Image (tube, rainbow, N blue to C red):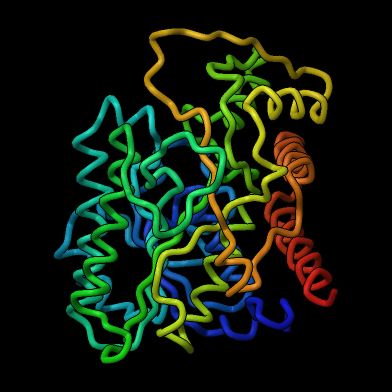
């Protein structure tokens, strides 16, 4: 059994029926690969990947799991699929995930992120089976006051832009359903929400994100354009929050009273670095062919300069922590994308990164 005391155990996930909405996305694909490697029966509900290059197909997940390609806003279809699969555990990741895109497409952002959450919550409400549900939102759900200290789970929801405010609304919907329909003292359904920072890792090709933009620029032989080099972000390797989500789901499966609430999963304070620091580090790690330009424009939409999460609750109650620091995370990303460029076995490399992450966690728990 991997992950020692108070941590996630591989044996728990064997044969568990897990539904992931948004499984074709970056985090959803990594979570699917991890769960499948532990023997879980994973199904997905998602739109088709919208790019020719995407992690879902890179991992061959279209062959390893069943996915219903449909819109999370289609309640009737979602409910039909939900009843058919009858999951034990649900990770809700389906979302419009980009801040700058939300400025141009606010109605789509609100309808997907708000009504998508309400739809999956309603599917759960209309069922009676014992289940665990985790809504994956964002650190941007908080009303950001540019504080130097981290936001705790009971801080007010808010958001300057359509994306951030839609995630705050998604949190409020989760809380309202939990209090209205899923009292843990009387109900066998466990509901929680999770918030993480700027998640990075191999295989993220999203538009308008720093590291994906950098990888694309390298592939095209161009310099990446940096908009806001002084902005500080809570960078974390993709496996860190996913480990937290799975750890939480396992705890909720056995103890609804202690864990049905909101949780932060962010990086260590030392890994909150500026955009400029990140890109310079990647240039050094990548080597030949990597360069960048800084271009600051007054026409850019508002972006937060500083946002940090207080993860004390997850550390103390779940014994959760990350097993690699930011430099190691960036090394993993460079290794991953260079391997892809060189046509190496990227699936095996990704599984190796998961395995190495687990081993480091086990060693930390033993100490």
Figure quadrant of residue 222: top right
Q: Residue at x 53, y 36 (%)?
A: 205
| 27 and 366: which is toward the camera | 366
Residue 203, percent from left and from top: 60, 43
In the image: residue 97, left or right of residue 197:
left
User: Is 229 drawn above or below residue 98 in the view shown?
Assistant: above
Which residue is at 71% across, 41% downward? Answer: 333
The structure residue drawn at horizontal position 22% and vertical position 70%, both measured from the top left corner, is: 177
Q: Position of residue 127 (x, y in %)?
A: 22, 82
Tell me the quarter of the image containing the N terminus.
Answer: bottom right
Residue 158, above or below 123: above
Q: Position of residue 266 (x, y in %)?
A: 58, 52
Q: Which residue is at the far left?
A: 76
x and y, in percent, of residue 359 in the image: 80, 68
**Residue depicted at x 40% and y 82%:** 88
Task: Judge by depth and name the residue closer to the eye, 149 or 322.
Answer: 149
Q: Establish if 47 lies above or below 100.
A: below
Quadrant of the image for the C terminus?
bottom right
């Amino acid at each position: 059994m991997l992950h020692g005391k108070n941590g996630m155990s591989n044996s728990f996930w064997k044969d568990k029926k897990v539904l992931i909405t948004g499984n074709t996305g970056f985090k959803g694909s990594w979570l699917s690969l991890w769960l499948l490697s532990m023997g879980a029966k994973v199904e997905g509900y998602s739109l088709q990947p919208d790019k020719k290059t995407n992690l879902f197909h890179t991992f061959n997940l279209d062959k390893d799991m069943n996915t219903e390609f449909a819109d999370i806003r289609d309640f009737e279809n979602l409910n039909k699929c939900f009843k058919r699969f009858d999951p034990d555990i649900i990770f809700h990741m389906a979302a419009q995930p980009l801040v700058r895109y939300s400025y141009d497409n606010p109605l789509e952002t609100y309808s997907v992120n708000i009504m998508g959450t309400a739809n999956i919550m309603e599917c759960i409400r209309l069922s009676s089976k014992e289940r665990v549900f985790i809504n994956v939102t964002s650190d941007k759900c908080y009303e950001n006051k540019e504080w130097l200290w981290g936001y705790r789970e009971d801080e007010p929801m808010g958001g300057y832009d359509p994306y951030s405010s839609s995630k705050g609304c998604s949190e409020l919907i989760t809380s309202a359903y939990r209090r209205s329909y899923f009292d843990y003292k009387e109900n066998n359904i466990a509901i929680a929400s999770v918030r993480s920072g700027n998640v990075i890792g191999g295989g993220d090709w999203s538009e308008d994100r720093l590291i994906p933009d950098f990888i694309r620029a390298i592939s095209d032989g161009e310099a990446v354009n940096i908009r806001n080099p002084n902005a500080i972000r809570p960078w974390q390797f993709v496996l860190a929050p996913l480990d937290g989500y799975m750890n939480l789901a396992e705890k909720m499966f056995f103890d609804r009273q202690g864990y049905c609430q909101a949780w932060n999963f962010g990086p260590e304070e030392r890994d909150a670095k500026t955009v400029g620091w990140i890109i310079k580090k990647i240039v050094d790690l990548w080597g030949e062919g990597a360069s960048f330009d800084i271009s600051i424009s007054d026409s850019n939409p508002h972006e937060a300069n500083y946002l940090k999460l207080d993860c004390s609750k997850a550390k103390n109650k779940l014994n959760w922590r990350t097993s690699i620091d930011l430099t190691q995370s960036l090394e993993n990303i460079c290794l991953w994308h260079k391997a892809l460029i060189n046509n190496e076995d990227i699936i095996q490399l990704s599984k190796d990164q998961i395995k190495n992450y687990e081993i480091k966690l086990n060693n930390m728990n033993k100490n």
